[in-house]
Amino acid sequence: MGLKCYTVYNGTKIIGDNAFYISKIESIISPNGLTCIGNAAFCGCANLKEIKLPDTLTEIGEGAFCGCI
């Protein structure tokens, strides 16, 4: 079945490159503090329906959401 929802912990600043590459994740929630989403972090996550990003986000890497619908 796999991970469906992921909540980023307070204090997390970066979601790394390929962190959820081709996973079945459906939603991600991030509190304030996140500043960077790495290259291809969510690439191929076709089931991703909801993402909540904070105002502190300043960088989204290349192809971070490629293949997401």
Image (cartoon, rainbow, N blue to C red):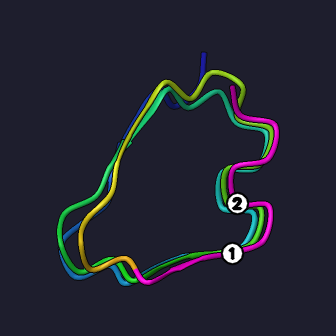
Count residues near mark 2 (Cα–Cα under 10 Å), then give few for <14, some for 14-19, many for 20+: many
Q: Which residue has dot 1 on it? A: 61
**Given the image, on which type of amino acid does mark 1 rest?**
Gly
In the image, which disc is placed on residue 39?
Answer: none
Q: Are the residues at dot 2 and dot 1 in contact (C-beta closer than 8 Å)?
A: yes
Whether residue 66 appears in magenta in the rendering, the answer is yes
Give the image location of residue 64, x and y in percent: 70, 60
Read off the residue under disc 2: 64
Up/down of 13 relative to 29, above or below: below
The quarter of the picture where the C terminus appears is top right
State the CA–CA distance, disc 2 to disc 1. 5 Å
Amino acid beneath label 2 = Ala
Res. 9 image quadrant: bottom left
Front-most of residues 46 and 21: 46
Which segment did they paint magenta?
A: 58-69
Q: Is residue 29 left or right of residue 69?
A: left
Residue 35 on the magenta span: no
